[in-house]
Image (spheres, rainbow, N blue to C red):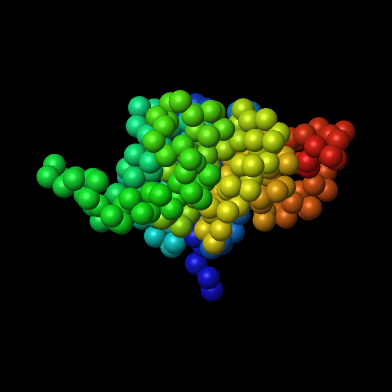
Amino acid sequence: MITPSLELRQLSKQFGHAHIIRGIDLSVSPGERIAVIGPNGAGKSTLFNLISGRFAPSSGQVLLNGQDITGLAPYQINRLGLSRSFQITNIFHRLSVFENLRCAVLWSLGYQYSFWQKLDELRDARERAEEVMEAIGLGWRRDIAAGLLTYAEQRALEIGITVAGGAEVILLDEPTAGMSRSESDAAVELIARVTEGKTLLMVEHDMSVVFGLADRIAVVVYGEVLACDTPQAIRNNARVQEAYLGSHAPQQEGV
């Protein structure tokens, strides 16, 4: 039996009297791509915060490659092989594209905090950063301050930072939010390329992005998984149509 890359067992989160996540069970196989969709306020970002350690769950478990990571700090979870991006672009605006990526690869290459080691002398860190930089299409922007990039380029850089450390489980939180159609199409190609062979869990509202990437789609409504199935099965699910997109949702826009 193959151990899931990521497994949620009766995961719940309560803030005061408000139940945001209500006993979610979800299993993600190695190399699988799952998109999490649902209306605003469904609990999708809270779910990501529970998985990545930003929030401690009220109850339930999170397992990474069979290891219980429930309640661990985000940096501990990251070092065990899970990395995530955020809805709001999270980069070092004053550092160059190259410097942002080099920062992201240091720990995975065994470089810990040191005041006497010169970064420019770390050949493996430079080569890995440049490899990721080319993969995300920003080689030509190598020495530009990240804050001067276009919005789409900044999102690409954040995806690059997320995968640069070599994590095998990747969480992307609305990676194409705010993008034009052409930018979203390019982002889909980028995500497919840089996460090839990795396990991907993605929150996304754009149905064309979801259907372009997902092996399965998990529909979250009021903190619960309403359905989790293949894109075609979700497209034809009457409960999903009613609860999420409305019973008369046009087919060409997604589910």
Along the horizontal axis of the image, is 32 left or right of 149? Answer: right
Left or right, residue 45 beside residue 121: right
Along the line of sight, which residue is nearer the eye, 193 or 107? 193
Tell me how many marks there are: 0
Q: Quadrant of the N terminus?
A: bottom right
Q: Residue at x 25, y 52 (%)?
A: 122
| Quadrant location of the C terminus in the rendered image | top right
Q: Nearer the viewer, residue 169 or 27?
A: 169
Could you tell me if residue 171 is visible in this image? Answer: no
Where's residue 234, x and y in %?
76, 48
Along the viewing direction, whichever of 53 and 8 lies nearer the viewer = 53
Q: Residue at x 43, y 26 (%)?
A: 147
Q: Residue at x 71, y 34 (%)?
A: 181
Left or right: 105 in relation to 2: left
Residue 16, by quadrant, is: top left
- Residue, x 18% and y 45% (percent of image)? 118
In the figure, is residue 113 to the left or right of 39?
left
Query: Looking at this rendering, what residue extends furthest in the front direction?
Result: 140
**Location of residue 62 in the rendering, given as x and y in whole percent from the top left corner:** 45, 51
Residue 35: x percent and y percent?
63, 46
In the displayed structure, 95 sits above or below 112; it is: above
Asked whether residue 200 appears in the rendered view, the answer is yes
Farthest-out residue, bottom: 1
Residue 64, position as x, y percentages in the image: 43, 57
Q: Quadrant of residue 38?
A: top right
Please tell me which residue lies in front, 249 or 163. 163
